[in-house]
Image (tube, rainbow, N blue to C red):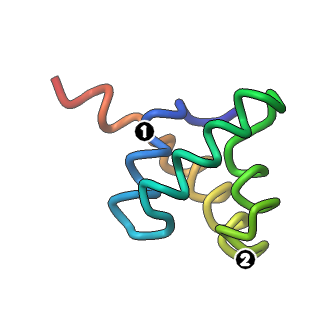
Amino acid sequence: MPFPPPALEEYLLETGIIDRSQLSLAKKLQHRQQGPLLMILLELSFIDLEQLSRLLDLGRTYPFDHAANAG
């Protein structure tokens, strides 16, 4: 995965792509399925293919590590 999950989760919430209840459900399923969070969000129809593509591109160019470097 090109970016750490906590930063991705923060980004998804801050931008309003998903809400906390959607994230909570997706994380429960992720724990059971051991799959990438973005794929689970797609399976649940919380994001669409276009959003998935944009998030993957964004993760390559901006690795969602700003939260880790904020200290």
Q: Quadrant of residue 53?
A: bottom right
Q: Quadrant of residue 48?
A: bottom right
Amino acid type, residue under disc 1 in the picture: Ala
x then y, percent, for residue 36: 75, 38
Amino acid type, residue under disc 2 in the picture: Glu
Q: Which residue is drawn at 80% across and 27% down?
A: 34
x then y, percent, for residue 24: 52, 45
Q: Mark 2 points at which residue?
A: 50
Q: Residue 27 carries which label?
A: none
| Residue furthest out toward the top | 71
| Element on which disc 2 rests | helix
Q: Which of marks 2 and 1 is nearer the N terminus?
A: 1
The residue lying toward the viewer, choosing from 10 and 44, is: 44
Q: Residue at x 73, y 76 (%)?
A: 50
Q: Mark 1 points at which residue?
A: 7
State the CA–CA distance, disc 2 to disc 1.
20 Å
x then y, percent, for residue 67: 30, 35
Q: Residue at x 75, y 62 (%)?
A: 44
> Position of 32 compared to 3: left or right?
right
The residue lying toward the viewer, choosing from 47 and 33, is: 33
Q: Which quadrant would the N terminus be assigned to in this image?
A: top right
> Position of 15 compared to 26: left or right?
left
| Element on which disc 1 rests | helix
Q: Which quadrant would the C terminus be assigned to in this image?
A: top left
